[in-house]
Image: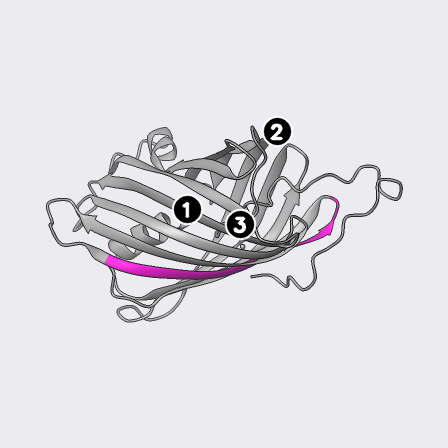
Amino acid sequence: MPRFICLIMLCLAMPGAFARAGEPVTAPSEASSPGWFENPTRSRGLVSPTALPLHAGEGFIGQQALFITAAELGLSERVSVNVASVLPVALAVGYSDVQFNLLAGLKLSLPLTERLHLAFGAQGGSFNNNLPGMRDIHGVGAYGILTYGTGDGSLSLTVQPIVTWEGGDNEGFVMVLSMLGGFVRMGEHWGLAGDVALSPGEGLAGPFAFATAGGRLLGQHWSVDLGLLAGKHLRHYKGVSVVPGASLLFHWG
């Protein structure tokens, strides 16, 4: 079970969003809604990323799923870098079983048409810990994302192969995580988002699946996600684990 929990954390932190997407919501004209602003969260869903890029110099930092400190920065109109870690929260609450944790990566976005975007990315990191029955976990992953829509309404398919291995082991474990996610902006300051994900291979902890659903409050320089995550190990554990989640991020640019 600890391995399964850590793999879920790894997938949440890797940029590695299914609500009803339908046709993208068209932003009202400036005359009809002078307060309407570009969605600052368009590059991500509740869990999964989108292929929509950040602008050069645009970014965010904050707590994703509360325990993950995450940040992303646009280096250009097509390239962004990201980092994520649970270490700041572990240190803040005095949890000594997590010694070090850092994931870092890069994403390249390519617009195919006005509404269709393709993105590729890679990420790697380590999870060093003293959790019972588990050694340190290391991982590297790549992903491809196809997104249809705009910042106000989109549907994304992400395929992410991830190679993980435990400290002291020469054997690596391969898992392929597939995610379908979406976001729809229902008003100037709120929208709905969600994801469904499946990893059918053995990997480090066997096949598993999870789903998220929730709402997003957003302003020009902040966003708050509130939702639920339901996860299930498909082989070794019965039942479904459901936990609430929240993300609070500050945006700039």
**Amino acid, disc 2:** Gly
Tell me the element at label 2.
loop
Figure check: 88 above or below 64: above
Q: Position of residue 77 (x, y in %)?
A: 56, 36
How packed is label 3: few (under 14 Cα within 10 Å), some, or many (20 or more)? many
Residue holding disc 2: 253
Q: Earlier in the sequence, mark 3 or mark 1?
A: 3
- Most prominent secondary structure in the magenta stretch? strand
State the residue at coordinates (17%, 48%).
166
Position of 136 compared to 193: left or right?
left
Marker disc for residue 51: 3
Q: Position of residue 225 (x, y in %)?
A: 57, 46
Q: CA distance from mark 3 to mark 2?
A: 18 Å
Figure check: 99 above or below 43: above
Residue 120 within the segment the image draws in magenta: no
- Please tell me which residue lies in front, 65 or 132: 65
Residue 104 appearing in the image: yes
Q: Earlier in the sequence, mark 1 or mark 2?
A: 1
State the residue at coordinates (22%, 40%).
129
Position of 171 compared to 96: left or right?
left
Residue 184 within the segment the image draws in magenta: yes
**Amino acid, disc 1:** Gly
Q: Which residues are magenta?
A: 174-188
Viewer-side label of 1, 2: 1
Residue holding disc 1: 121
How packed is label 1: few (under 14 Cα within 10 Å), some, or many (20 or more)? many
